Amino acid sequence: MTRRILAAALVLGAAGGAHAAAPQTPEQWRAALQRDIEAGYQLTLENHPGVHDVHNTDFLKHLQAARDGALALSGKVEDAAGYAAAIQRFTVLVRDGHAGLFWKVDSYLKPERWPGFVAVWRGDGIYVYASEPGGPARGAQILSCDGKSVEQLMRDNLFSFLGRIDEPGQWWSMSRWLFTDRHNPFIQLPQRCEFLSEGKRSTRQLAWQERTDQYVKWRNEAINGDRLPVGLTEPRPKLFWAAMPTFTPEAADRDAYAAMNREVAAKRDRFLDADAVVIDLRHNQGGSSTWSRNFAAALWGEGRVKRRMDAYFAKTETWYRASPGNTAYFGELAERMVAEKQPDTEAWARGISKGMQAALAKGDKFWVKRDEDDGKPVPNPEADVAGDPPAFTKPVYVIVPGQCASACLDALDVFTRFPNTKLIGAPSSADSTYMEVRLVMLESGLAGAIIPNKVYVGRPRGNGVGYAPAIMVRDVDWSTSTFLRTVERDLAGK
């Protein structure tokens, strides 16, 4: 199966021309929310493949619940913060990572506040990642707030308006927002919390204050630790560290990926004699699956990767939702690729546009894209063949952050085809089977809709299914040194 994911979605304006004037009163914010919820619902209904996906009959039910749930909040909306919270409620209730709405009202919001510390989930509880002087100790466990367990606080204050509660990885990645005041009028901000540090319990009154640059830094570090540049290093002899913090690389990072792959190929004898290779996906939030696939080909051998992936996706089909809006998107994308002088992507987009136009003419809901090798069995995909390089069998550790989704999950699909791979870190997020997302701004200019154009039917990794680590790293500090120690301990155990 051909798996091609664009590094950046095309952002289109909804039909209707110029944006409306910004709301000024509570009544206007309520009216704007109601219009935008209905408009976003309609755009999704007309274009999202999930609406007609016979393999996911719950999608339409969730979409309708999202509209109803968001509109139910509209009576209490008085400003941009309430508007944003209700938009987020819509997305939460859709219950799909590639569906929903997003808001663009940053300039109307009050500054965020925080209580002087940032907290993170580590699988068995929530802990203080970092704190200002006089605050709770780093590593202290937060047991409860205002008589409510932190798990319940996460459910009520966080997952009611952000993320997907059923995915373990989302608890790891979204927890940093729990003690952030975004002026959501539909939640009760915690005021008094109980902490456990070095066996001693203490209670603190939270002092909410406007956020600082320190807050932003800690919030970004909390779920990922330090960020290494794209490339290959050798922390000690015979231990190689491949940093892949992004799959949406700029020019310099693209060059770094190419250089890393060349080095792996040129120094293959050193890798065959390595103690281990670490693939570091911290900070990665997806993009294009090309970068992980190319690295895997350099490490294990291009033929081996292709045979395993062909076998893995042998029964997977790609169905494009043939709506007028989606079809026009691919036509516009093809023209954009002409301007950017990317002929391969232009031909790909134009071919999809033609296929979808043909489906539209017949009244079909989907155009099924078929490649020559789709559905063909791959005999003995794990067997070596003539021309394969010497087999790479040394341990491979893949560091997985909680936000790993989309092309980051594609990378795990590839790496885990090889039995010498071990995942460490956090549970990943899960992935929708709906892909090739475009973002469509609503007429108000205050929000937009998330519209994927295709659905994978028969994908081995199901809708909402993620990866669990073989080694869960519960350390509050997710630094490179922490993971180096984790790898060394596991190697010593072998």
Image (cartoon, grey):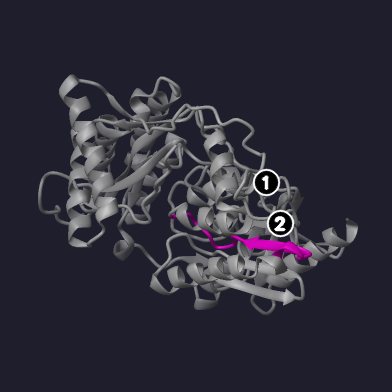
Number of other residues with Cα within 10 Å of mark 1, as a class: few under 14, some 14 to 19, many 20 or more: some
| Amino acid bearing label 1 | Phe
Evaluate if marks 1 and 2 touch, with contact meaning CB atoms under 8 Å apart.
yes
Quadrant position of the N terminus in the picture: top left
* Mark 2, secondary structure of its residue: strand
| Amino acid bearing label 2 | Val
For the residue pair 360 and 68, the one nearer the viewer reads as: 360
Disc tally is 2
Question: Residue drawn 58% across and 71% down?
Answer: 263
How far apart are labels 1 and 2 at the CA level?
9 Å
Q: Is residue 107 magenta?
A: no
Q: Earlier in the sequence, mark 1 or mark 2?
A: 2
- Please indicate, yes or no, whether residue 323 appears anywhere in the rendered image: no
Q: Which residue is mark 1?
A: 418
Q: Which residue is mark 2?
A: 396
For the residue pair 44 and 359, the one nearer the viewer reads as: 359
Q: Position of residue 66 (x, y in %)?
A: 39, 33
Q: Is residue 278 magenta?
A: yes
Number of other residues with Cα within 10 Å of mark 2, as a class: few under 14, some 14 to 19, many 20 or more: many
Q: Position of residue 45 (x, y in %)?
A: 28, 30
Question: Where on the picture, by quarter, is residue 342?
Answer: bottom left
Position of residue 187 in the picture relative to residue 455 (left or right): right
For the residue pair 65 and 345, the one nearer the viewer reads as: 345
For the residue pair 448 and 52, the one nearer the viewer reads as: 52
In the image, farthest residue toward the bottom: 133
Position of residue 349 in the picture relative to residue 184 (left or right): left
In the image, farthest residue toward the right: 493
Q: Magenta segment, which residues?
A: 271-287
- Please indicate, yes or no, whether residue 213 appears anywhere in the rendered image: yes
